[in-house]
């Protein structure tokens, strides 16, 4: 249990470093942004949802599993987190446009 608690104590530092590395998305950098966001999902989200995104500590991020929620619900979950669970809010680190891109790709099963 202590290892679990320690792992989540490091999350804010890791997330902040990831956000600085990612930076805001702009229209002129669409391909670079797609690669950066896909990498964020695989690395940061994958650390809890499984590196294949088929589940781990967090629920699967597969199209079948995500079909229970609307796009707007999923965007809200990512931006605001889920209180009482390890799912953190990403609003301080990602724009709504970035999260919309991520959610759309996850729903389609089309993450580069």
Image (cartoon, rainbow, N blue to C red):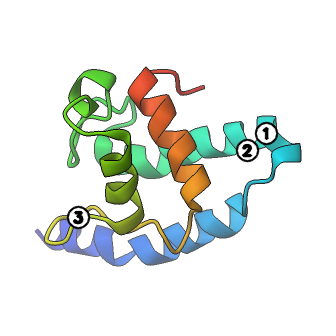
Which residue is tagged 1?
30
Q: Which mark is residue 16?
A: none
Query: Residue 28: image x %, image y %?
Result: 89, 45
* Disc 1 to disc 2: CB gap under 8 Å: yes
Judged from the image, the secondary structure of the residue bearing numbered disc 3 is: loop
x 42%, y 63%: residue: 79
Which residue is tagged 2?
33
Judged from the image, the secondary structure of the residue bearing numbered disc 1 is: helix
> Between marks 3 and 2, how big is the CA–CA gap?
26 Å
x 52%, y 75%: residue: 92
Vertical order, 7 against 33 (above or below): below
x 20%, y 48%: residue: 57
> Between marks 1 and 2, how big is the CA–CA gap?
5 Å
Q: Nearer the viewer, residue 4 or 40?
A: 40
x 43%, y 21%: residue: 109
Q: Quadrant of residue 78?
A: bottom left
Which residue is tagged 3?
82
Query: Residue 105: image x %, image y %?
Result: 50, 30
**Image quadrant in which the N terminus is located:** bottom left
Q: Tell me if I can see residue 105 in this picture.
A: yes
Q: Nearer the viewer, residue 3 or 84?
A: 84
Q: Quadrant of residue 55?
A: top left
- Quick one: label 3, few (<14), some, or many (20+) residues within 10 Å? few
């Amino acid at each position: 249990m202590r290892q679990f608690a320690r792992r989540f104590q490091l999350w804010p530092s890791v997330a902040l470093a990831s956000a600085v590395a990612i930076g805001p998305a702009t229209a002129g950098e669409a391909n670079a942004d797609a690669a950066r966001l896909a990498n964020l999902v695989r690395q940061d989200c994958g650390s809890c949802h499984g590196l294949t995104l088929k589940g781990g500590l967090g629920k699967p991020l597969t199209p079948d599993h995500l079909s229970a929620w609307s796009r707007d619900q999923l965007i809200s979950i990512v931006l605001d987190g889920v209180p009482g669970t390890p799912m953190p809010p990403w609003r301080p680190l990602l724009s709504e446009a970035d999260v919309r891109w991520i959610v759309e790709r996850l729903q389609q099963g089309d993450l580069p």
